[in-house]
Amino acid sequence: MKKALVCGAGGFIGGHLVKKLKKDGYWVRGVDLKHNEYSQSLADEFIIGDLTDATIVASVCNLPFDEVFQLAADMGGAGYIFTGENDANVMHNSASINLNMAHYATKVGVKKIFYSSSACIYPAYNQEDPSNPNCAENSAYPAAPDSEYGWEKLFSERLFMAYHRNYNLNVRIARFHNIFGPEGTWTGGKEKAPAAVCRKVAQAIEGGSIEIWGDGKQTRSFLYIDECIEAVQRLMLSDFTEPVNIGSDEMISLNNLAKMVMDIAKKPLSINNIPGPLGVKGRNSDNKLIHEKLGWKPSKSLREGITATYSWVKQQADCK
C-alpha cells in the first residue's frame, strides 16, 4: 500500500485529493490548520498543525512517503490577494511552509513531492490584452508577477528545483489556473470568482443585479476540481520535473461568466460593474506543454463544472 502525505488536506483541493487517493487504495496522512468546512476527511490520520513551524513539519513528514502533496499556502481570491493588506503574511507563511517541506522531505527520503504553484507567477506585462494573454511555461521570465503571492510562488518553484538539483529531491511542479468546484470557499472574502459569482446569483432577488469588480471584460480560464486531480496524478506518474500548467484553455470574461451562471440558474439579472481589487486583464492556461508531455487535456466544459458548482453553492446559501 502506497503512503501519501497531503499538506493542506483541510482545504478545497487537498480535501478532494485525499478522497481520490483513498479511492485509489493509498494510506493517507493529512495535515492542515483546520478541518475541511464542508466534509469529513477520509484521511487515515488527520493532524491539526501549523506547517510554518519546523517542529510540526518534522513530526508529520517523518516517513519516506511514496508521495507528498504540498498544497498548503496562505492564499485566497482577489479580495484577499490584491488588496495589498495581506502581502507580508502571504509571503512569510507560504515561504516558511515550503522551506520546511523541502528540507524535511529531503531529510527523510521522500520518494516524490508535488508542489502546487500558480498561474499568478506569470508576468503582468504578458497579460495586458484580455483577448490574447501569454501564459506559456517558458514566458515566466523576465519575472514580473502581478502580486506578492505570485512572487512567493515563483520563489518556491525555484526552491524546489534547487533541492531537486542539489539533493535529488524528486519534484513535480504544477502552475494551477483557477481551480473550482463544490466544497470550495464560497463566501467570506477568500473565495475565487466562480464561487463568488455563484453566490451572488444564488442570493440575488429576481430582477435584481449583481456586482462584478472592474469592467467585467477581464478574462480568465477555470478548471473543474476533478480534472485538476486527474492532471496532478498523471504528472506524479510521469518523469517530467519542470513546471507545467494545469488549467483549462476555455477563456471567458467575468461578465460572460456571470451571464453563464444566470442562465444556469434561470435567473435573469443585471450586472453592476464596480471598482474592486483586480489582477491582470487577461489570463488563460496554455496547455500545449502538458498535452505534449502527458497527453492530458480537460474533458469537461466550463458550463458543466459551473452547473455542478452553482447547485452546491446555492444549497450552501439556502442553508445560511
Image (cartoon, helix red, strand yellow):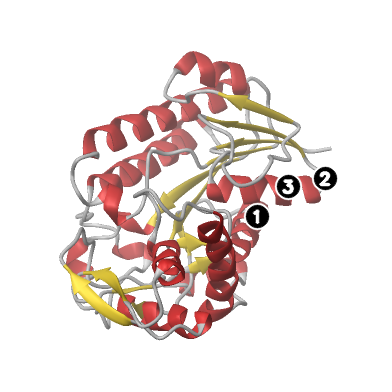
Q: Which residue is mark 3?
A: 21
Label 3 to label 1: alpha-carbon separation: 9 Å
**Mark 3 nearby-residue class (10 Å; few <14, some 14–19, many ≥20):** many
Q: Which residue is mark 1?
A: 233
Residue 299 found in image quarter: bottom right
> Which residue is more in the foreground, 58 or 235?
58
Q: What type is the residue that disc 3 sits on?
A: Leu
Q: What type is the residue that disc 1 sits on?
A: Gln
**Left or right placement of residue 154 versus residue 163 in this view:** left
Label 3 to label 2: alpha-carbon separation: 6 Å
User: Residue visible at 54% across and 49% down?
Assistant: 12
Q: What type is the residue that disc 2 sits on?
A: Gly
> Which residue is more in the foreground, 269 or 275?
269
Q: Secondary structure at mark 3?
A: helix
Q: Which residue is mark 2?
A: 25
**Mark 1 nearby-residue class (10 Å; few <14, some 14–19, many ≥20):** some
The nearer-to-camera label among 3 and 1 is 3
Q: In this orientation, does residue 216 appear?
A: no
> Which residue is more in the foreground, 145 or 306?
306
**Left or right placement of residue 177 versus residue 35 in this view:** left
